[in-house]
Amino acid sequence: MTTTAALAQRLQSLVRPGDTLWWGQATAEPLTLTRALVAHRHALAAGGRLRVFVGIAASNTLQPAQADVLDFFGYAAGGAHRALAQAGVLDILPCHYSQLPTLLAGGRLAADVVLLQLPPPDAQGRFSLGLACEYLPTAIARARVLIGEVNPDVPFTAGGPLLQRADFDLLVDATEPPPDLQRSAPGPAEQAIATHIAGLVEDGATLQLGVGNLPEAVLAALHGHRDLGLHSGVAGDGVAALAEAGVLTHARKTRDAGTGIAGILMGTAALRRWAHRNPALQLRDTGYTHDAQVLSDSHRLAAINSAIEVDLTGQVNAEVAGGVYVGAVGGAADFLRGAARSRGGLPIVALPATHQGRSRIVARLSGPVSTARSDAGFIVTEHGVADLRGQPLSRRVQRLIDIAAPEHRAALADEAHALLRQCGAAFH
């Protein structure tokens, strides 16, 4: 019997047909467990079906063909999970990321089986949650079955709950390292955007960053700053580099002074090495990282998030591109509102002005409104910064046209007249 088959047999004694399974997303995926699950899904489902909660992917574990017995649902279609959305087998949960713990705790979302990727235990025999805290503590509290995969390449991190061996129904050793989340080198547009944003961020600011290449480019552009802090749902390799350069000190934070806060680490081995037993880092649950009061109390919170497109009134689509679900509602609305309430805060949405020759500043969104125009603050492209705070529709339109790609500005101005007439506003 192969090792994978032996593991599947053990899983079969714990997983029941009809169960809903959760595991850490992205780099926190326990690959030994998840790959055994999908390889032996028919035996585990035992003639029924299993539900799987889907977040951002850093591996290709989940494939559309597995929908023969697996029902995929989740808040995001990031990374390789985009293929699930394109195949029509991903049922999107259109909620704010910050709502997931509440939906779990209230029983609106089931979590029967939770799979965790863990570091080796400490001297007291305790396991940290390693690379991700996020919504996992609430899922763990609701689960009937808890299964852990112990991986020596996973860092031991502070901030989240510590688990004992007795908490687990099954513990196995990992057979491969955790998945990396690689970023490509930023292009000229991303570098220009990062430079604009770096010019807005003051020394001593607290940073929140979304997912993708652009936040990493922004971090690289901040190496000339001093005493920056971190309070973010996600931290990547750029965070580690900024900390090792002495820029990210958290010294001026008004919450958690001296300590960086994140929900998940999405990066490579460099990030994992930096995070291991780092006293200046805590991974906290979503109820803390996205809490409205915590965010508004955070001194000079610079919330930096990306988008697929922004319309001329400031509405943001961060979910659908070309008719395919590729993103998420995510936590942008929580962080933008928190930054707007923070003393000296910066609510920033950044995006390149074009994609494959098409303008990403548009008269009308081609997808849903992920962030309302009432929450728009700064919109940044490589062509400049549009400060929409306190601006009526007519001025918003002009400022957004000014940061669109030059070749699209005339067409956008023509469309703006009709758009503003519908809104009862004037455009000059």
Image (spheres, rainbow, N blue to C red):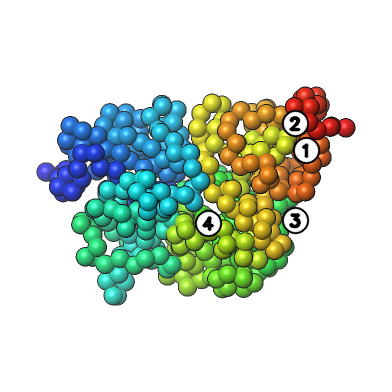
Q: Nearer the viewer, mark 3 or mark 2?
A: 2
In this rendering, the answer to whether 211 lies above or below 156 is above
Sequence-wise first label, 1 or 3: 3
Task: Assign the C terminus to one quadrant of the image.
Answer: top right
The amino acid pointed to by label 1 is Leu
Sequence-wise first label, 4 or 3: 3
Sequence-wise first label, 3 or 2: 3
Marks 1 and 2 close (CB-CB < 8 Å): yes
Q: Residue at x 75, y 45 (%)?
A: 388
Q: Does residue 121 appear anywhere in the picture?
A: no
Foreground residue, 96 or 189? 96
Q: Which residue is mark 2?
A: 423
Q: Does residue 107 appear anywhere in the picture?
A: yes
Q: Nearer the viewer, mark 1 or mark 3?
A: 1
Q: Residues within 10 Å of mark 4 (few under 14, many from 20)?
A: many
In this picture, residue 400 sits left or right of residue 276: right
Q: Position of residue 189 (x, y in %)?
A: 69, 41
Marks 1 and 3 close (CB-CB < 8 Å): no
Q: Which residue is mark 4?
A: 290
Q: Residue at x 72, y 62 (%)?
A: 344
Sequence-wise first label, 1 or 2: 1
Marks 2 and 4 close (CB-CB < 8 Å): no
Q: Residues within 10 Å of mark 1 (few under 14, many from 20)?
A: many
Q: CA distance from mark 3 to mark 2?
A: 33 Å
Query: Which of the numbered marks, if any, corresponds to residue 393?
Result: 1
The amino acid pointed to by label 3 is Gly
Q: Nearer the viewer, mark 2 or mark 4?
A: 2
Foreground residue, 107 or 382? 107
Q: Residue at x 43, y 49 (%)?
A: 100
SS type, badge 1: helix
